[in-house]
Amino acid sequence: MSTDSAKTVEIKYTVTLHPDNLTSEIAVTNSTSSSIQLIGSFLSHLTVSSPDATYAIGLEGSNYLNKPPLETHFSIVPPDFNDKLTGQGQSWVKTVFPGLLPNWGRNSNAEAGNAKTGVVKTDEEIELEEDDNYAQLTDKMSRIYTYAPTRFSFNDRGRRNSVGIGRDGFEELYIFSPGSTDDSYGKYSFVCTGPSAMLKPINISPEDIWRGGQFIYNPNM
C-alpha cells in the first residue's frame, strides 16, 4: 500500500460473527486518477457429513462453466482432483494478495488479450445450465456460475441441517465439491463456495468505492 493517500488503492475486509450468521464484507477505495479492474474471490469451506448427503438448492436454470479449483494457500483440494476430473486444465489463477483474499488482484491487459486469442472452445469455455433445483454434490465439481440467484442454500441430510448463502456486489458464484470418495467422512468432508469475480472483472472508477460481501446463515449455530 502506498503511504500517499492521494494515490492509494485501499482494501478493507471485515468479518462479523452474529449468533446465527457470519458476514464478510470487502470495501475497495480507488483514490488513484485512473480506473482499476479487480479479479478474484473469497471462499468459505463448510463442513458436511459427506458431499454425497449434501444438496445445493435453488440454482436450477443458472448458467455455469466448469473450471479447475481456485489456486490458494487456504484451499483444501484432494491431490488427485485435477487428475480425475474430466475436462479440466491446469490451475488458472495467480495469488496476488496472499493471506487476505484468494486470487484477488488487478486484471492485466495481457490476460484480457490472451482470453480473446482462442479459436476452439474447450470444456472450460462451454457455458452449461443447471437442470436440477436440488443438485446432489456426490460427483467432483468445480464451477463458476455466471448467472445465479444471490441467495441459495446447502442442505445436509446427514446432519439434518440447512445453511443459507447470500452475496452482494458480485455477479458470479463459485462452488466446489471434492466428491464422495473413500475419504468422504474425513479430511475432504466439506463443500466450498464463495462470491466470485474471476470471469468478469469488477471496474472501479477513480475516486470511487466498491463494496461486496457474503453472508452464511445457519440457524443451528
Image: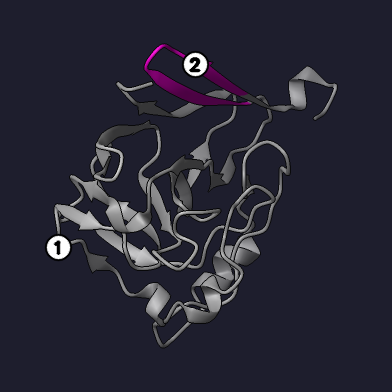
Q: Nearer the viewer, residue 82 or 88?
A: 82
> Residue 107, position in %: x, y?
60, 53
Residue 174 disc label? none
Q: Which amino acid does label 2 sit on?
A: Leu
Dividing the picture into quarters, in which one does residue 137 lie?
bottom left
Q: In which quarter of the image is residue 85?
A: bottom left
Q: What stretch is highlighted in magenta?
A: 13-29
Q: Is residue 115 visible?
A: yes
Asked if residue 193 lies left or right of residue 136, the reply is: right
For label 1, count other residues whose C-alpha is less than 10 Å away and answer few (under 14), some (14-19) or many (20+).
Answer: few
| Local secondary structure at mark 2 | strand
Residue depicted at 34% across the width and 25% down the height: 217
Residue lying furthest right: 3
- Name the residue type under label 1: Asp
Please state the horizontal and vertical placement of residue 46, each as a whole percent of the image.
44, 41
Main SS of residues in magenta: strand
- Verify whether residue 26 appears in magenta: yes
Q: Mark 2 points at which residue?
A: 17
SS for callout 1: loop
Mark carried by residue 131: 1
Depth check: give the residue in front, 119 or 151: 151
